[in-house]
Image: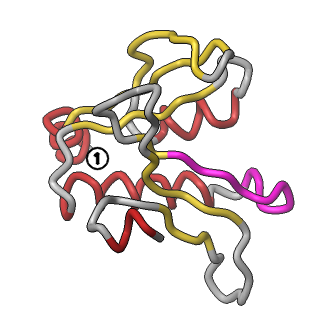
Amino acid sequence: MGWDRAGIPSQFAVIPRGENAIVGYCGFYHHAEVPGEIEIGYRLHPDYWNRGLITETARAVRNHGFHDRKLSRVISLIHPENIPSRRVAEKNGMAVEKQITFRGFPTLVYAMAFDEWLAWRDAS
């Protein structure tokens, strides 16, 4: 909430249409370990996996970042063995840029720049 109050992109609650429950979150994260980068991160209650909900939400967050927040680039930090999260990033138009060690674990950096988003959006 502090980031939001300061005008810095932050997280959003995930609430399925027609329901009155928060089932996860998706939004922007700022990590000291990757300075200058803004991550699109997400977490969803397992009961809601495999419904396309987090893919839809991550796309909305990405679009908000580029269109409304005028971000130049976004990333997602994903453990290599987390295939479902990798699929979400790929469906979101992101591609693996490199592998880093993040908080002691091998981590893939998926990335998308503003111009890549424009091309992806225009092709969709």
| Residue 50 in picture, x, y percent from top left | 74, 51
- In this rendering, is residue 57 above or below 13? above
Residue appearing at x 53%, y 46% in the figure: 41
100 in magenta: no
| Residue 52 in picture, x, y percent from top left | 63, 55
For residue 31, side relative to residue 107 (left or right) = left
What secondary structure is found at the residue carrying circle 1? loop
Query: Residue 59 occupies which quadrant of the picture?
Result: bottom left
Query: Residue 106 occupies which quadrant of the picture?
Result: top right
In this figure, which residue is indicated by the disc labeled 1?
A: 124
Question: Tag 1: Cα neighbours inside 10 Å, few (<14), some, or many (≥20)?
Answer: few
Residue appearing at x 25%, y 37% in the figure: 73
| Residue 10 in picture, x, y percent from top left | 42, 61
In front of the other: 24 or 93: 24
Residue appearing at x 84%, y 54% in the figure: 46
| Residue 12 in picture, x, y percent from top left | 51, 68
Q: Which residues are magenta?
A: 41-50
In front of the other: 56 or 114: 114
